[in-house]
Image (cartoon, grey):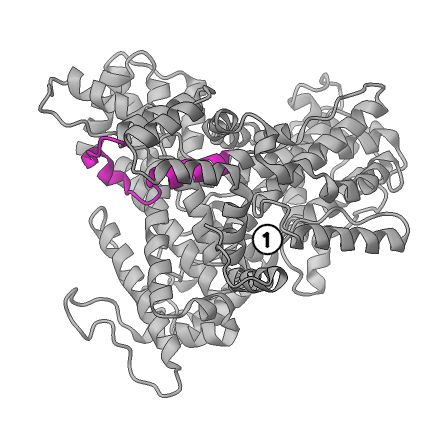
Amino acid sequence: MARMRRVVEHLARAWRHSPAEGLESILTGNPDTTALAAQDVASSGGGAEGAPKPFWSVKARQIDLWSLLLHHLIADIEKANLHPLWTSGGPEFDRQVARALWRIGPESNEHSASSNAPTQDASLPAQAVTLAKVISSYQDRVHRLESRLTPTASYPGRLISHSHDPLRLRRAGKAAWVAFIYPLLDTSMIKPGGVEEVLDGAWELIVTLGYVEMDLRFKDGDSWTEYNTRFGFGSLREAVVSGLERAARRIGMVDVFGADPETFLEGIFFSLQKLGLNVEPQDRQRIQGIVSSLAPVRAIGLLHPAIELDIAEGAPKELIDLAVALFPGSADFPALNDNTLFQAIDGDLSALASGAEIAEPRERQSFAQHVELFCRCMRATLVEPFTAWDLPPGRSTELLRQLMKLDASNWWREAARRSIWLTLRLFGSSALKRRHAELDPHFASVLQQYTITPEGWESHRADCRLAPRTGSYSEAQSRATIESLVRYFWDRLIFIAVEPDGPNHLAHGRGIADFTAEGALLRFMALFREFRAPVPPKPLGDPTIERETDRTMREALSSGDVLNPFANFLIWQVLLQRLRHLAERAGGQEADDQSWFDTARISGALGFCADYLFGQTTGLSQVPLSSYPELHHPAIPPAIALWKKARDAEDVRDKLADWARRQGDAAALDRLYSTREALNRTVRHHLQDMMSPGYLPRMLNESRAREAADYWRSPD
């Protein structure tokens, strides 16, 4: 009740004019959080002695805690000299670490020296035992944090035991999954005869929500490793990083909305109504969608595509505005003036969209439009996990750097899957605008394989108000069509987003034709399944062109002329623009090419760069949210004020320089300008070293040899 009273009182004081906006602010943040806190204190009679306590959003708390946990995890792994084994130890090393982890019992006493000592086993390498101790310490830390908010059980492997891949479970089917996991589990905590019932419910929850709150305890490290290989995230590091993310998201939500957010939200609506502050039905639906998006796992398919895109695309706006203010011209980024990388793929895109593969003009245009939609979805779903409206400058990029340092790519995989799902849904919605007789014959045959009849198709179009109801209308056939379309969406998502594991995988791609918009779109989206250097679509012409394109791409990426990892954002935007322009020209419209700077700005890449720059300049990258009310350094309030002005698209470079001279330290101005003028060097070299450990020493040695010099200034 105390949590709900605090939220309702905050809304009544600070958001009486718009309680719906206030609820969104509590969930995803408001850039004026600190100012609102001061207003809140003043209106409640706190006076001068009342210290402002910002009401940090659920999402900011989640990102902040996740970043803080990863920050300390990286430090502990490097302190133990385990980073090379963490990133490339391999499956057998993962198995040994899991064995050691299961032999470390849950904490019995916080101060007990033996609580983190695994049973001695000469077969386990010392490094595996050491890494298991590190993971166990974070498992215990997370358990203590969660236990302060809601009672939770502690058991071996708790942090990583919830690493389920919903698409792999869905592909295998419930019966196969239950048969596989049953012998691997410790069922002593489940009532006799109830295991099958528990697993039946667990499967439904995992494939729907992406996670399950009930404890599925594995017998030992070998059992977990076997499960993680087949139905989990595949590696120990992905399981640990994802486990910390789930914990941070759960703690951030419970801290504000309690253990049952949906019921808590209904209580808020009821309390606001009693105060005469009503929330409109459409606002309620949106807020409920936001609550769902902040669950421990961002589930696929729960929200309407329009709601999900709206939630995701709102996140990077302040970063983009900041980028425009700090970098008003592409001259600040010399590498962005070199189009070599994309000149190589222009011809391939032209061939792709002009009909080398798709004969029907309308299908070509549909393909181009949906590639553009996919790029938009991918950009939104990639940026959304890293940003909150009230997240301090620098934190978003710090989190991205931490994930790359830990060689974790589940964030990429989940973004790609959500983007593919959204694009498939939008593809289906676009197809519904046509009568069944107007569909591409190949696609119509695919629908027939999913038992979608012409009558069912037209009945569903009538329910969507895309066609009038006729005498052949059938509500039952419309419902059956919806169920079949959903099955079609899941099949296609599994086919292109999950690596094949046998001949049964092909069943999810049945009916795909090579010369249709659907086939071309699926092949294009499959390129983004894994986190790797961005590549263009497969050329459709001469094999010589294919080899030349591959060579050009490798040279461009290895030369360092691209701001990796931000190059991915840029590539999607260039693909988006090229295909849109091709589609417009095909329709008789000419479109001017946007500049490189516009491409980077729209993509959100410069937002991350600017966020990184400001965080490094002010030194605020790792200040916990809980410490912000206690920060009293005189340089910090002016810095935050300047950041807010930059967010509003005001050119603040001179003011930043003045801040550095008057209120920052002596090196702040030098850092600001050297970082801004040499951003390619600053970001590229260090991030590239994170992705490829040892890159910096190699680059330094090559530079010394090339210059024949004894002295070389390292990138900083």
Assign a secondary structure to mark 1.
Answer: loop
Q: Magenta stretch: residue 239 in it?
A: no
Q: In the displayed structure, does residue 610 sit left or right of residue 259?
A: right
The picture places residue 425, in percent across and down from the top left corner, at 64, 35
The picture places residue 664, in percent across and down from the top left corner, at 30, 34
Foreground of the two, 87 or 184 = 87
The residue range painted magenta reads 607-635
- The residue at the point 77 percent across, 45 percent down is 449
The picture places residue 454, in percent across and down from the top left corner, at 79, 32
- The residue at the point 42 percent across, 36 percent down is 672
Q: Is residue 200 above or below residue 620?
A: below
Foreground of the two, 307 or 503 = 307
Tell me the quarter of the image containing the N terminus: top left
Q: In the displayed structure, does residue 27 sit left or right of residue 601?
A: left
- The residue at the point 89 percent across, 48 percent down is 541
Residue 394 appears in the rendering: no
Residue 564 appears in the rendering: yes
Q: Magenta stretch: residue 628 in it?
A: yes
Residue extending furthest front? Answer: 709
Q: Main secondary structure of the magenta part?
A: helix
Q: Is residue 116 above or below residue 297?
A: below
Residue extending furthest left? Answer: 49
- The residue at the point 83 percent across, 40 percent down is 347
Q: Which residue position holds label 1? A: 531
Foreground of the two, 607 or 186 = 607
- Residue 592 occupies quadrant: top right
Q: Is residue 123 above or below residue 701?
A: below
The picture places residue 562, in percent across and down from the top left corner, at 62, 45
Q: In the displayed structure, does residue 276 sit left or right of residue 21?
A: left
Local crowd at mark 1 within 10 Å, few (<14), some, or many (≥20)?
Answer: some
- Residue 318 occupies quadrant: top left
In the rendered structure, which amino acid carries the disc numbered 1? Phe
